[in-house]
Amino acid sequence: MTFLSDRVNRIPPSGIRVFFDLVLSSKGIISLGVGEPDFLTPWNIRDEAIYRVEKGFTTYTSNKGLEELRGAISHYLKQQFSIAYDKHEILITSGVSEAVDLVFRSFINPNDEIILPEPSYVCYRPLIDLCDGKAVPLDTSLTDFIPRASDIEALVTKNTKAILLSYPNNPTGQSIPPSEVSKIADIAVKHNLLIITDEIYADLSFDSFQSIASIPNMKNHIIYLNGFSKAHSMTGWRIGYVCANEEYIEAMNKIHQYSALCAPTLSQYAAVEACQNSSDEVQKMRQSYLERARYFTKMMNDVGLTTIMPSGGLYCFTSIQSLSMSSLSFAEKLLKEYQVAVVPGNVFGESGEGYFRACIATDFNELKIAAKKIQEFVTEHD
Ligand SMILES: Cc1ncc(COP(=O)(O)O)c(C=O)c1O
């Protein structure tokens, strides 16, 4: 007999973590695995946190987060992405991860359907499941990993509650072109659906980028998520935010105040600095990821492993369909024979089968060695 709930028993452990427990137990591995920037948090941001510790800023903040930070984010979103949310429409969370959980818990009723373009980030499905919602996958592998508005519309039923977007995407690196973004917005209005948009990689876009939240008169349909983990190299600070109209924010804040109280205070002060004074650093990091993504994409295509150049973010998503092996056996063999760790594509949904994800935010010399080893692997197994 177990005391565990049916809900928790039903969700699988993260496929990425399961695979990387294997990596941790091996030596001399080059890991292109976990999606983490290889830059330290810019110094001015760390320095701000040190100053706040010295001055004793160690208490709770208001549940919604520091007013100063919500104001800074409001300004930042306007400048960067032409997105208009005022500080009452922003809730500071412990990373985008908490924000995703809050959104699902606040909006999903049992049996509500959420259209989920896949391959997609691993947390969405299990968290939808925990709310007794139903993720309805849209296979984007046939459309160069770009979710098409017409394909989304074809999945709408009377139970559809929301469309979940995330672009530039983890794991595919692909964005949604502005023309398609507008069509998706039209569908949300036409069928009265919510759009949940996780734009955590937006600041790391290599190409033109349009947030769906910048389209006028959409506020009642949009829940916008972003954070500091990726573009500002702040993964361990656990700081993110959700923007929406005030009614929605107050609803999410009801859960947040009971389950989290507030996001980490020092991280909130550091994030103010990140919003106000880090554009040069972010630009340098973006440029460096772009160079590495170009290199890796070319190396893979050179040996017949089709890889679409990412539009932004930290990942390349490479096809191994020419090798006639599954994603998992490719990743296991590559690890065992060449000591290179990548993530098998199937952990991001069924449509990721036949691919692997490589995080290119890895030291460039190591990335070069890893890419050459993958080339050797292909020559040997062709
Ligand atoms: C698309 C996406 N959303 C959210 C997250 C979680 O970010 P955070 O560190 O802000 O919780 C990640 C992390 O990999 C991600 O790729």
Image (cartoon, grey):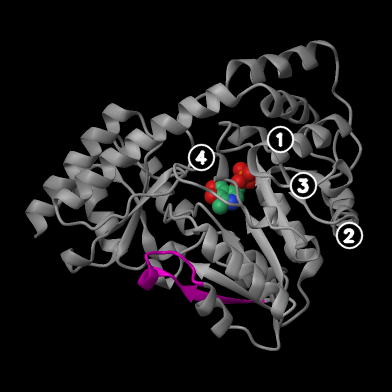
Q: Which of marks 1 and 2 is nearer the N terminus?
A: 1
**Residue 330: % across, % down:** 25, 59
Q: Of discs 4 and 1, which sits in the foreground? A: 1
Q: Which of marks 1 and 3 is nearer the N terminus?
A: 1
In magenta, the rendered stretch is 134-148
Q: How crowded is mark 1: few (under 14 residues within 10 Å), some or many (20 or more)?
A: some
**Residue 105: % across, % down:** 77, 65
Mark 1 highlights which residue?
A: 76
Spot the residue most to the bottom. Answer: 158
Q: Residues within 10 Å of mark 2 (few under 14, many from 20)?
A: some
Please tell me whether residue 144 belongs to the stretch shown in magenta. Answer: yes
Please indicate, yes or no, whether residue 64 appears anywhere in the rendered image: no
Residue 306 is labelled as none
Please indicate, yes or no, whether residue 155 appears anywhere in the rendered image: yes
Please tell me whether residue 63 belongs to the stretch shown in magenta. Answer: no
**Residue 205: % across, % down:** 49, 43
Q: Earlier in the sequence, mark 2 or mark 4?
A: 4
**Residue 316: % across, % down:** 36, 49
Q: Of discs 3 and 4, which sits in the foreground? A: 3
User: How far apart, in angstroms, are the residues tagged by discs 3 and 2?
Assistant: 20 Å
Mark 4 highlights which residue?
A: 204
Residue 84 is labelled as 3
Q: Earlier in the sequence, mark 3 or mark 2?
A: 3
User: How far apart, in angstroms, are the residues tagged by discs 2 and 4?
Assistant: 30 Å
The amino acid on which the numbered mark 4 sits, given as a three-letter code, is Leu
- Residue at coordinates 76% horizontally, 12% vertically from top-left? 51
The amino acid on which the numbered mark 2 sits, given as a three-letter code, is Ala
Mark 2 highlights which residue?
A: 251
Q: What secondary structure is marked by label 3?
A: loop
